[in-house]
Amino acid sequence: MAISFQPTTEPDVARLLPLYNHYVRTDTATFHTEEIDEATLRALLFPGYPRFSSWTVHSDDALAGYVILARYKPREAYDGSAEVTIYLDPAFVGKGLGTAAVTHAEAQARERGFHSLLAIICGENTASLRLFEKCGFVKCAHYHEVGKKFGRWLDVISLEKLL
C-alpha cells in the first residue's frame, strides 16, 4: 500500500464533505452536531493563511481522508503553533495512514517554522489519543464535560508536541 499526500484543492471539498459529515452523524471525533455544507468545510480546509494548509491522504489511488495544519487561535501570538486534525475514511482506519498523516503534518510544520503542534481530541476517542501519543505528543490539558453531543457531556483532551 502506497500512502501519499497532496495539497487539498477546490474539487476535493465536494469529495471530502461526505466523509466529514459521516463523523458529524456518527462520532464524537467532531463536535459539530449538525451536518455542514461545502462552504463550512472549505473554510476548515483553506484557512487563508499561507503557513496553515491541508492535504488529502491517499492509499494507493484511493482518497482515504485529509489532514490539516490549522491556526490554533486567531491571535498573532499563537501563530508559532498549529493544531493537527485528521479525518480518515473508516475503511482506511488501522492501516497506518493516521501515523503517516501525523508524520506528514509534523514534517510540514517543521518546514514552515512552527514551534509546537497541538491535538485537541474528545476524551472518548481513545484510538486518536493513542495515535498522537505514539507520535510523541504528550497530554497537556484535560477539560471535563465541555462539549455535549448525542445527549452526553464529553471531555476534551489536549496533547502537544514541541518541535
Image (spheres, rainbow, N blue to C red):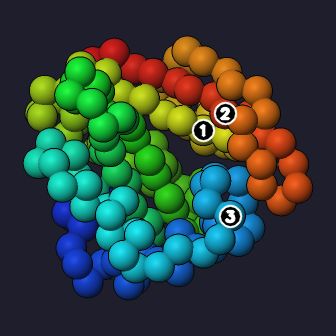
Q: Residue at x 56, y 26 (%)?
A: 158
Q: Is residue 163 visible?
A: yes
> How many residues crowd around disc 1 within 10 Å: few (fewer than 14), some, or many (20 or more)?
many
Q: In which quadrant of the rendered view does residue 43 lie?
A: bottom left
> What is the CA distance from the residue labelled 3 to the residue labelled 1?
16 Å
Q: Position of residue 156 (x, y in %)?
A: 66, 33
**Which residue is tagged 3?**
33
Residue 29 % position (x, y): 63, 52
Tell me if label 1 and label 2 are in contact, CB under 8 Å: yes
Q: Is residue 40 placed above or below 136 in the rendered structure?
A: below
* Lower sequence index among marks 2 and 3: 3
Q: Which element type, helix, strand or loop, lies under badge 3?
A: loop
User: Which residue has dot 1 on it?
Assistant: 121
* Residue located 36% across and 59% down the image: 44
CA–CA distance between discs 1 and 2? 6 Å
| Left or right of residue 136: residue 163 | left
